[in-house]
Image: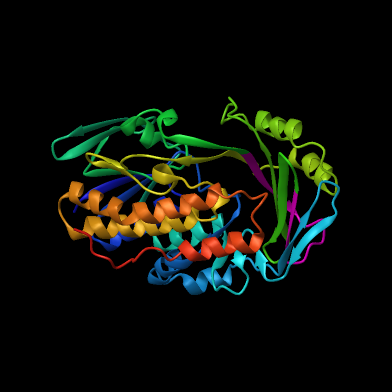
Amino acid sequence: MATVLISGSSVAGSALAYWLREQGFTPVVLEHAPAPRRGGQAVDVRGAALSVLRRMELEAAAHGLENHTDGMSMLDAEGNEVFRSEEVALSSGNLDSGDIEILREDLVDLIQERNQGIEHCFGDSITAIAQEDGGVTVEFEHAAPRRFDLVIGADGLHSNTRRLAFGPESRFIRHLGTYLSVFSEENYLGLDRWQTWFNSGAVGGTVMTVRDNAELRIFLGFASDPIEYDYRDVQAQKQLIADNVTGLGWEVPGFIERMWKSEDFYFDAMAQIKMDSWSSGRVSLVGDAAHCAAPLSGQGTSLAMVGAYVLAAELGRTDDHEVAFARYERRMRPFVEANQALALMDREKTPPEEMVARTDAVKNAIDLDAVVD
């Protein structure tokens, strides 16, 4: 039974572990964090990804944890409402679409419940990958070296697996000119199943309700050329938000004040990953590690779930991993490119209804049962 090391335990890694075991493989999941990661944004499971969730028999459970939104408002710098809709929301699309908006951590928890018995190694990371005839020897920061048949990087935008197997991140990352943060807070605003977007030129953000209105997810961001910063220094990242998100009224000064006390603050660049190939020998990539579309696309989670399903299906069709990796890429690349294009829309000039319509047009643009040779 072939062994597969999966680096990363979020949506892509967890879904891949599930589907690989279904195909008869022995997955081992590695996660740099000491425990499953909490916090983050609400994510959308749409179109083809919803079909994948259904095939995992998790659709009903996901609906039970679904984040319900009744509409959205858009405010100017002073807090004046300039747009309002009870039909669409920028984060979740048409409100009657049947798609599922769910907190990232809740979706991962659902998948992990199905992954009982799969080996998980937390608090460690890969330091070296040596490909040899018939396998891959992997060295770790803490654990002893181990040998696997395949290694799959599902470790996100700043993938360590990609760096070790393909080269430095700078070769593949395409900065989109924006930095974004997100953190949680109790619903002290009393918002009721609502999203409020605010913007003034180069700065803006969103506040939305989650967990049956009990909590808020607050997003603050700004436009900028690439910035050098320490990914591990959260206080420095908070300072970047405080220094750059200025000139906005309404509740934004209070958001910034509360940000300093947040324990689940997350900050990163809006960026895409562009690669000529997602595989090298016995190493391949899935999800954001292979083709991050950026949160602006609204399709990162769907790409992760569909990619995991397709990759496992192709590995299950043949004993030749190179053939499987090539088929996986041929099936996924058109879907990826169509969804990456969503993040490049001019949000200043594109009406929300048109943005949602473009997403609806591509969310099913892949046949999960196609056979590619």
**Residue at left 47%, top 54%?**
339
Answer whether residue 14 is visible to the viewer in this image.
no
**Residue at left 62%, top 38%?**
179
Q: Quadrant of residue 101?
A: bottom right
Which quadrant of the figure contains the C terminus?
A: bottom left
**Residue at left 85%, top 54%?**
80
* Residue 93, x across and y down, in percent: 60, 64
Which quadrant of the figure contains the N terminus?
A: bottom left
Read off the magenta span: 179-198
Q: Quadrant of residue 64?
A: bottom right
The verdict on residue 148 being magenta is no
Colouring of the image:
rainbow
User: For this rendering, which residue is in front, 182 or 261?
Assistant: 182
* Residue 98, x across and y down, in percent: 55, 73
Answer whether residue 372 is visible to the viewer in this image.
yes
Q: Is residue 188 above or below residue 261?
A: below
The verdict on residue 185 being magenta is yes
- Which residue reaches farthest front? 349
Magenta stretch, main secondary structure class:
strand
Determine whether, in the image, residue 120 is placed left or right of residue 182: left
* Residue 79, x across and y down, in percent: 84, 51
